[in-house]
């Protein structure tokens, strides 16, 4: 389990700043968590049998699994149900899914915070949900044994039936629940002692069963946040300032807005959580009229301290900070790279950059807020219920225990909905007008106010000895610190040089599984970027930029020493010391990708090349082993065509093969999009790109062939949502070098940069 998440188990509801950031309703207060239309209610009826807080079996035999993770199209709710179903012995057609609220009962002491990210969900929940399913099977079996008067040890459970082969007696799950005989409960120690199935005994895990959320999502009954309708509801449309953060509202002239039919009020946000800055929300009877009113408002701003900040100034500041010997904190400090460089036969240095990137989920950010007496109800899809409920409470000025969050299906998240900014205008508008308010961001709001992937600058220096063996690497990573912005100490990591905590979610991946005796990684916070472009976690998090640098540098070293880059990696993945085990799994994925792609066995036409990369995303302790071979063609103009991506990934145990492949393929294409097409720029403190005409993700016509090899070896399940994102860009960059001799070091890769490098 990821220790950051495990630590975040709230125990108090004091009204300190920390409680607003991370507190949840940890008391026993019952707030009447109502179900949401289109989602099965997470509250069990009295006649239900609840072997676990995470699922209930009704008298008709239906099994409803409550998912504590955000479902944003990755089918994690169905995955949780499939894991429970395997050990429970239920029939798949009897399974249903629900989405968890912030009811205190879901503050699980084992699973920790309700957060969806880091490709953690399956790996962190697999064992707990398996044990929950097994406990239910045991309780039902003992109940059936008592009802039938036979020994429990002689019963067989399959497809929601409990059968006694000797006597031919049988009971369905529904029969046992209705009989009231299933009463066994389990202590934590008893749960831990349950012997789970071995992989060779699985009948459900590893089967591509129909996803439970597909019918409702195709017939329109599934409700997303944007679909919420409440009696008497008004709508809010945002007016955001010209700078990303730091502006304040000086005055609001609503005289023209008052002429818009249905206009109610213009609310200037007073956000004590400091999530937003300089926002105004126009409230009206319809969304169309709210937008008209917002456009009619005349707002004067103090643009604040970031009004002149640009992408170039962020990069300049990053370079300045990197040159300072006392900047940042050390994330890795093994050996003495500086001494090793002094004796190295060859030293290679390079700078790598990535641009600001935007999440842009298909469903724009939205939230609906309603006050019922002292209780605030929030309807929204979010990835971090543990924090979001507290942010909503901070916006309302109430104790977090008085917030009820209704989790909705998410129309895309990708890390964007780890933040709760959409709740603040809804909460404050609802409070100001005395009725429920739904706030919907325009695409322009969503893009210009995104908690984006930060602009990053990395300086990497490597040394090799006379035999071409890699002996030292120093790696400086300069960026905004997205996780530090959350203000949650448990999500920060102590630095190895004892200089204080650092944001490891900006450097994960730089602590690779290659054997290098002298290795430094320094995390440097770019305060200018941190303040001017408040950053968030975008699908792949730090490995999206750290592996861009690491895997590009490994290729540069191989080229400098005349070695094949794939074989050079294999030699470094020897599993020595702390790299034991992980290095071998990573080596296997690289070999699998090489074999599937035909790397090194094909005579390619002039101007074409293959490049490799292999990564251990996300964190070292929760790694998924992934390798990619990219096949590209480079024209004399510098234009790059990605012809094929071959991705191999070791997932340990795969719950749903089709879904695993879909996640890996989607992640690879996302990585391609970041590598080649996506770039946001900052000018005068504001994001310049406001819609998909200026911010241009991968189009279908640009999609190459994608081949996938999944290694399922029965080890613990790993994550698949993000790792393939991180491996694609360096594989493409390395392929470009092999095709043309051009070395690119900035993302996104442009024809101009390739052509310039070819000439150089």
Image (cartoon, rainbow, N blue to C red):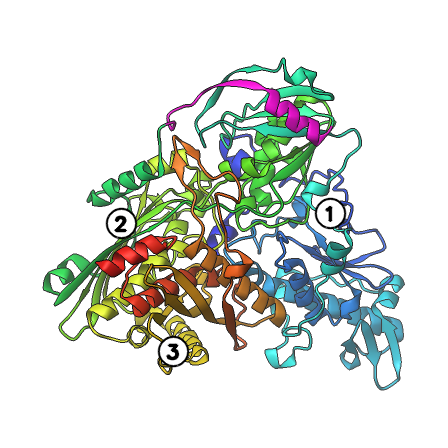
Marks 2 and 3 sit apart, C-alpha to C-alpha, by: 42 Å
Which image quarter holds the C terminus? bottom left
Residue 720 in sight from this viewpoint? yes
Residue 24 in sight from this viewpoint? no
**Closest to the observer, 113 or 570:** 570
Displayed quadrant of residue 283: top right
Q: Which residue is mark 1?
A: 223
Q: Are marks 3 and 1 in contact (CB under 8 Å)?
A: no
Q: Which residue is mark 3?
A: 599
Q: Which residues are magenta?
A: 286-307
Q: Which residue is mark 2?
A: 497
Outermost residue toward the left? 343
For residue 171, the mark is none
Vertical side of 217 occupied by 245: above or below: above
- Return the x and y of residue 716 as percentages of the image width and height: 53, 70
* Few, some or many residues within 10 Å of mark 2 (<14, 14–19, 20+): few
The residue located at (48%, 45%) in the rendering is 695
Mark 1 or mark 2: name the one nearer the start of the chain. Answer: 1
- Return the x and y of residue 184 as percentages of the image width and height: 76, 63
- Return the x and y of residue 715 as percentages of the image width and height: 52, 74
Q: Secondary structure at mark 3?
A: loop
Q: Are marks 2 and 3 in contact (CB under 8 Å)?
A: no
Mark 2 or mark 3: name the one nearer the start of the chain. Answer: 2
The residue located at (42%, 64%) in the rendering is 641
Vertical side of 597 occupied by 82: above or below: above
Q: Secondary structure at mark 1?
A: loop
Question: In this image, 337 relative to 734: left or right?
Answer: left
The residue located at (46%, 59%) in the rendering is 671
Asked if the magenta segment contains residue 301, the reply would be yes
**Closest to the observer, 449 or 19:** 449
């Amino acid at each position: 389990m990821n220790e950051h998440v495990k630590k975040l188990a709230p125990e108090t509801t004091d009204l300190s700043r920390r409680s607003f950031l991370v507190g949840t309703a940890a008391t026993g207060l019952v707030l009447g968590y109502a179900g949401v239309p289109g989602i099965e209610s997470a509250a069990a009826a009295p006649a239900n049998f609840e072997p676990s807080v995470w699922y209930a079996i009704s008298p008709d035999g239906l099994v409803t699994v409550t998912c504590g993770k955000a479902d944003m199209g990755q089918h994690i709710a169905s995955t949780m149900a499939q894991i429970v179903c395997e050990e429970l012995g239920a029939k798949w057609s009897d399974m249903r899914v629900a989405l968890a609220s912030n009811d205190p009962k879901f503050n699980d002491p084992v699973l920790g915070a309700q957060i969806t990210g880091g490709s953690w969900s399956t790996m962190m929940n697999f064992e707990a949900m398996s044990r929950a399913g097994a406990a239910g099977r045991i309780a039902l079996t003992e109940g059936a044994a008592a009802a039938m008067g036979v020994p429990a040890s002689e019963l067989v459970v399959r497809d929601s039936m409990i059968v006694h082969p000797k006597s031919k007696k049988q009971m369905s799950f529904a029969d046992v629940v209705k009989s009231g005989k299933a009463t066994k409960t389990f202590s934590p120690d008893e749960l831990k002692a349950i012997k789970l199935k071995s992989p060779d005994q699985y009948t459900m895990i590893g089967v591509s069963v129909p996803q439970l959320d597909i019918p409702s999502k195709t017939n329109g009954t599934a409700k997303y946040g944007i679909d919420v309708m409440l009696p008497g509801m008004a709508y809010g449309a945002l007016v955001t300032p010209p700078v990303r953060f730091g502006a304040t509202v000086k005055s609001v002239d609503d005289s023209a807005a008052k002429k818009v039919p249905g206009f109610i009020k213009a609310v200037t946000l007073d956000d004590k959580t400091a999530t937003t800055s300089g926002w105004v929300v126009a409230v009206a009877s319809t969304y169309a009229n709210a937008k008209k009113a917002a456009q009619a408002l005349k707002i004067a701003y103090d643009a604040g301290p970031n009004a002149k900040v640009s992408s170039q100034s962020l990069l300049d500041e990053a370079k300045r900070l990197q040159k300072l010997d006392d900047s940042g904190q050390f994330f890795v400090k093994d050996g003495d790279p500086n001494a090793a460089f002094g004796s190295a036969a060859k030293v290679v240095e390079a700078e790598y950059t990535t641009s600001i990137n935007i999440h842009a989920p298909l469903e724009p950010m939205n939230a609906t807020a309603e006050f019922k007496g002292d209780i605030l109800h929030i309807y929204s899809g979010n990835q971090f219920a543990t924090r979001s409920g507290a942010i909503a409470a901070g916006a309302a000025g109430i104790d977090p225990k008085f917030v009820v969050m209704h989790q909705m299906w998410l129309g895309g998240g990708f890390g964007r909905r780890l933040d709760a900014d959409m709740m603040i205008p809804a909460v404050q508008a609802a409070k100001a007008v005395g009725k429920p308010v739904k706030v919907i961001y325009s695409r322009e709001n969503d893009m210009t106010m995104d908690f984006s992937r930060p602009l990053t600058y990395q300086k990497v220096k490597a040394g090799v000895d006379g035999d071409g063996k890699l002996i030292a690497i120093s790696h400086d990573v300069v960026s905004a610190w997205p996780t530090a912005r959350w203000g949650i100490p448990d999500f920060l990591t102590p630095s190895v040089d004892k200089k204080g905590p650092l944001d490891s979610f900006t450097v994960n991946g730089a602590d690779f599984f290659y054997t290098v005796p002298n290795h430094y990684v320094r995390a440097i916070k770019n305060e200018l970027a941190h303040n001017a472009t408040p950053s968030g976690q975008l699908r792949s998090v730090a490995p999206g930029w750290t592996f861009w640098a690491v895997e590009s540098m490994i290729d540069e070293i191989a080229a400098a020493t005349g070695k094949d880059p794939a074989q050079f990696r294999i030699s470094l993945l020897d599993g020595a010391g702390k790299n034991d085990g992980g290095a071998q799994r990573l080596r296997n994925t690289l070999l699998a990708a090489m074999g599937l792609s035909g790397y090194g066995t094909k005579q390619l036409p002039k101007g074409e090349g293959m490049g490799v990369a292999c990564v251990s995303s996300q964190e070292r302790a929760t790694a998924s082993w992934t390798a990619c071979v990219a096949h590209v063609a480079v024209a004399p103009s510098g234009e790059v065509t990605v012809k094929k991506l071959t991705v191999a990934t070791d997932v340990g145990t795969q719950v749903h093969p089709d879904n695993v492949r879909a996640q890996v393929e989607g992640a690879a294409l996302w990585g391609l999009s970041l590598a080649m097409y996506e770039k946001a720029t900052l000018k005068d403190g504001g994001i310049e790109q406001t819609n998909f005409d200026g911010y241009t993700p991968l189009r279908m016509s640009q999609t190459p062939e994608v081949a996938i090899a999944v290694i399922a070896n029965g080890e613990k399940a790993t994550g698949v949502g993000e790792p393939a994102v991180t491996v694609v860009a360096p594989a493409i960059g390395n392929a470009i070098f092999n095709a043309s001799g051009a070395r690119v070091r900035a993302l996104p890769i442009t024809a101009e940069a390739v052509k310039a490098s070819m000439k150089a």
